[in-house]
Image (cartoon, grey):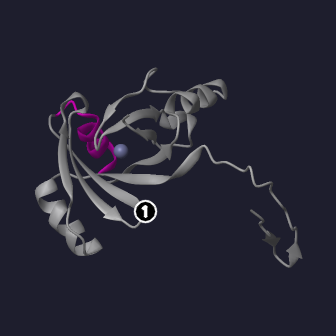
């Protein structure tokens, strides 16, 4: 794999070896906090021109979720199921909007170890079950410039 990177008119011409590997494979989904799925699902169906393919309640997280496929990535809408839900608190503080960015990883435990060693604050010490058949781990936004980051791996 060869890359030619340009900075302005200056060609830097960096070449990477073929063994290049990314720990974060891709943006798996963007999580968007909404007040009401009943309002937002039809809105996103119109916006994306694709039907919601799955809804799922994650009781342990206090959320109802709805998923849309957009090319390789997904959109996850999140509605609070109770007033103590992190989504209810998020909306009370910031209003509706982008809540988290989820990266697909090959080996979530290895990634958690790598990031923890670098000083990132993990919100759960072991991978937990998330929506859409994933093992997930969240990173505290205070260690990531205010962005809630989710790591996710397909559940074996
Ligand atoms: Zn998510």
Residue at figure coordinates x 43%, y 24% from the top left: 124
What residue did someone put label 1 on? 72
Work out whether 137 lies above or below 6. Answer: above
Residue at figure coordinates x 27%, y 73% from the top left: 47
Disc 1 under 8 Å from ligand 1? The reply is no
Q: Quadrant of the N terminus?
A: bottom right
Q: Please state if 30 lies on the left or on the right of 89 as rendered.
A: right
Q: Of 90 and 72, which appears nearest the observer? A: 72
Residue at figure coordinates x 28%, y 60% from the top left: 68
Residue 139 point in image, percent of width and height: 49, 34
Q: Of 36 and 115, which appears nearest the observer? A: 115
Q: Of 97 and 133, which appears nearest the observer? A: 133
**How dense is the environment of label 1, judged by Cα within 10 Å: few (below 14), some, or many (20 and up)?**
few
Residue at figure coordinates x 56%, y 34% from the top left: 143
Q: Is residue 96 visible?
A: no
Asked whether 68 falls inside the magenta stretch, the response is no
Q: Is residue 129 visible?
A: yes
Residue 67 point in image, percent of width and height: 26, 55
Residue 57 point in image, percent of width and height: 17, 40
Residue lying farthest to the top in this orientation: 125
Residue 141 point in image, percent of width and height: 49, 37
Q: Quadrant of ligand 1?
A: top left
What segment carries the magenta color?
83-95
- Residue 30's quadrant in the figure? bottom left
Q: Secondary structure at mark 1?
A: loop
- Residue 112's quadrant in the figure? top right
Q: Please state if 77 lies on the left or on the right of 124 as rendered.
A: left
Work out whether 121 lies above or below 72. Answer: above
């Amino acid at each position: 794999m060869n890359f030619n990177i340009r900075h302005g008119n200056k060609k830097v011409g960096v070449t990477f070896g073929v063994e290049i590997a990314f720990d974060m494979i891709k943006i798996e989904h963007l999580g968007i906090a909404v007040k009401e799925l009943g309002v937002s699902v039809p809105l996103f169906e119109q916006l994306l021109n694709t039907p919601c393919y799955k809804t799922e309640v994650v009781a342990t997280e206090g959320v109802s979720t709805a998923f849309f496929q957009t090319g390789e990535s997904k959109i996850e809408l999140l509605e609070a199921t109770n007033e103590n839900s992190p989504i209810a608190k998020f909306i009370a503080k910031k209003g509706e909007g982008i809540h988290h960015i989820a990266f697909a990883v090959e080996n979530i435990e290895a990634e958690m170890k790598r990031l923890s060693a670098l000083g990132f604050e993990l919100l759960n010490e072991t991978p937990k079950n998330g929506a859409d058949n994933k093992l997930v781990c969240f990173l505290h936004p205070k260690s990531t410039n205010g962005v809630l980051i989710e790591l996710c791996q397909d559940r074996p």
